[in-house]
Image: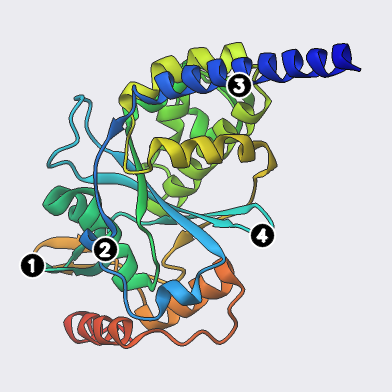
Amino acid sequence: MKKVIKALVIIIAIILVITAIIGIFIWTKLNKINYEKISKEDIEISAGVEENLKEYRNIAIFGIDTRENTYSGSRTDCIIIASINQNTKEVRLVSVYRDTYLEISKYGLDKVNHAYAYGGAALSMSTLNTNLDLDITEFVTVNFESTKDIIDKMGGVKITVTSAEASQIPGIKSAGTYNLTGEQALAYGRIRKIDSDYARTERMRTVLTEVFNKAKKMSVADLNNVLDKVLPEVYTNITKSDILTLIPQIASYSIVDSKGWPYETKGIMLNGVWYGPPINLEKNVSQLHKELFAQDDYVPTDKVKEISNKIIQKTGYR
């Protein structure tokens, strides 16, 4: 009996040592991430919203239009809200069109992508929260060069392109399904000439979805190589301990829907600048909560109603 107990103690000790080694390994990897301390107090959230969305974890993903390894003063070329249902593990993605005419705290009505240049991730999250009745307090920012590197390290992503899209992608001559390199996938995601910004954001979500799905299937060794390249180019306020709790759950997550927002919008020139105001903000926010959170007949907060009225007064669009 003593021998059995001794053997069990040795096995448990070995398991603990292995677990500790793995933990140290992952912790070391996470040290490569650029951590930006943004407290909850730095982010504006309308009253009652957090309680309303307590079953969801909403994270902002920002793509920056810079080729430099600095994000300060940069505008966001891509804004995606990743909404995670914490009960079902279903993930829904919503791209906010970069020209969307919303209210930025202390700056007034402007393009939503200007918020990052004015006040970084904190102001961008606050802008999304106050205009869309959300409770985002976490973000991940990457630049387009890092996106290209990520895809190359993963061995490319498989995407089906139309003949019109093929004409905009280096090395692609005709419609079909291709394993795109990082450069090709980035070109695909940034196409605007053949259609619209709305279609462009859909292509960006397609690339993101394919990257996510491929990462779930990668071996530990391959994923390790990707992380070595990716992590130094990522900025986030998600703590290492939170990331460690997320990692084991990734395989259980599935992206079930992907859309662009606002659902109804119409371009307008104001003082020589092109904007895309929602028509109207209240209605678009109600629809967003129905799509993301299954909240039928959602009534926006007074803050959203106030901003909606300002947009109507400025544009005349109801």
Are the two marked residues, 3 and 2, in contact with CB atoms closer than 8 angstroms?
A: no
Are the two marked residues, 1 and 2, in contact with CB atoms closer than 8 angstroms?
A: no
Earlier along the polypeptide chain: callout 4 or callout 2? 4
Amino acid type of disc 4? Asn
Classify residue 68 by image quadrant. Answer: top left
Q: In this figure, which residue is indicated by the disc labeled 1?
A: 271
Q: What's the mark number on residue 211?
A: none
Q: Secondary structure at mark 4?
A: loop
Does 179 appear above or below 94? above
Earlier along the polypeptide chain: callout 1 or callout 3? 3
Q: In this figure, which residue is indicated by the disc labeled 4?
A: 87
Residue at (46%, 32%) from the top-left corner?
Answer: 188
Does 44 appear above or below 27? below
Q: In this figure, which residue is indicated by the disc labeled 3?
A: 19
Earlier along the polypeptide chain: callout 1 or callout 4? 4
Residue at (23%, 54%) from the top-left corner?
Answer: 122
Residue 42 horizontal/vertical position (percent): 21, 59
**Circle 3 Cα neighbour tier, 10 Å, few/some/many (<14 / 14–19 / ≥20):** few
Earlier along the polypeptide chain: callout 3 or callout 4? 3
**Circle 1 Cα neighbour tier, 10 Å, few/some/many (<14 / 14–19 / ≥20):** few
Nearer to us: label 1 or label 4:
4
**Circle 2 Cα neighbour tier, 10 Å, few/some/many (<14 / 14–19 / ≥20):** many
Calculate the distance from the C-alpha at mark 1 to the C-alpha at mark 3. 61 Å
